[in-house]
Image: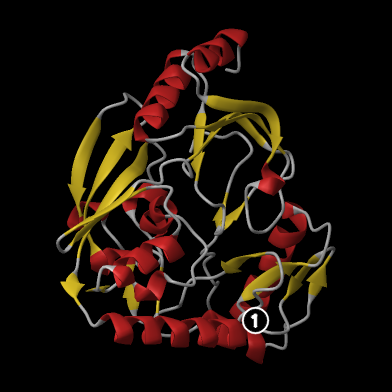
Amino acid sequence: MLTEQLTDRLKERKIEYRPGYALSGCGTFRIGGPADLWIQPSGTDAFIEAARICREEGCPVTVIGNGSNSLFPDEGIRGAVIGTKGLRDLTVQGGELKAGAGVMLPRLALEARNAGLAGLNFLSGIPGTVGGATAMNAGCYGSSMGSVLDRALVMDLSDGHTEIWTAREFGFGERDSVLLHDPSKVVLEVFFRLLPGDRKALFEEAEQMQKKRAGSQPLEDPSAGSVFKRHGAEAVSRLIDLCGLKGTRVGGAEVSPKHAGFIVNRGQATAEDVKALIRIIQDRVKAEYGFVPEPEIRIFPPEGGR
């Protein structure tokens, strides 16, 4: 667990850390208690070293990116929480783009456009990181990470070894991949093989996507994005709207009046508020349409270990 020896070893290797760091500052929901230890490596090598130290000291590790699709527990997370946002190297060579797990998706899409490479514009408005987006197969407008990823460097936290995975090995599904079901695996770097595109047309397309998103989503409010996965071809947000649940509140958590697929933090919302509101939505949709909507957001447990 968390020991003085662990922090001494991090300090010796000049890896940034903070004990008792509030997770409410690590996610777009602005919800969450303290992590026993927050670690912010400055790059891939430092991440591997930090994870190795934690493993050798018997400290459980939870890995997070931008926290844009995450709900952190009110009681915080035990053990170490390692952030990937320092893994932000990005290079373009020919039609291949290589990005660290901490690269923000809007930056990734912008660099592709600047290089005249098509295929990543759908990521322009998603406030997540490359690693998190890969784990959950983020997407919109008919595209997803699984459709553009060529290969990735993946680390096994249980023993520290790294290996290259092809897209097929991720088992991508609807906002899903094997990474969400195996807490020992984490993405460190992703490689995209893209086709040439017209730069002017790419920038115009991205602008239209941004306008559409701003007009339909509650971007001005703290949230974790779309709460539920699609049910087959059905957008669950439409069913929530038909159930008359827009504006429904539990504590500081509210079903957005602007977009029924979002739960927003109206101020001082807790994780328990959000989870209670999710249950209300699930119960109502099940009663009206016969199925329980599956959450898309990651609900982190307090015991850590992911």
* Rendered residue at 20%/47% (across/down): 165
Nearer to us in this view, 219 or 272: 219
Q: In this view, does 145 lie to the left or right of 235?
A: left
Name the spot of residue 301 as percent of width and height, x first: 60, 42
Front-most of residues 46 and 288: 46
Q: Residue at x 65, y 27 (%)?
A: 18
Residue drawn 47% across the image and 20% down it: 54
- Residue at which label 1 appears: 260
- In which quarter of the view is residue 208 placed? bottom left
Q: In this view, does 128 lie above or below 152?
A: below
Label 1: how many residues lie within 10 Å, few (<14), some (14-19) or many (20+)? many
Q: Determine which quarter of the picture holds residue 222.
A: bottom right
Secondary element at image label 1 = loop
The residue at 63%/30% (across/down) is 78
Question: Is residue 290 in view from this perspective?
Answer: no
Q: Is residue 132 above or below residue 292?
A: above
Q: From the top left corner, tell me how far across and down residue 255 is, in percent.
A: 72, 75
User: Residue 218: x and y, percent?
Assistant: 66, 77
**What amino acid type is highlighted by mark number 1?**
Ala
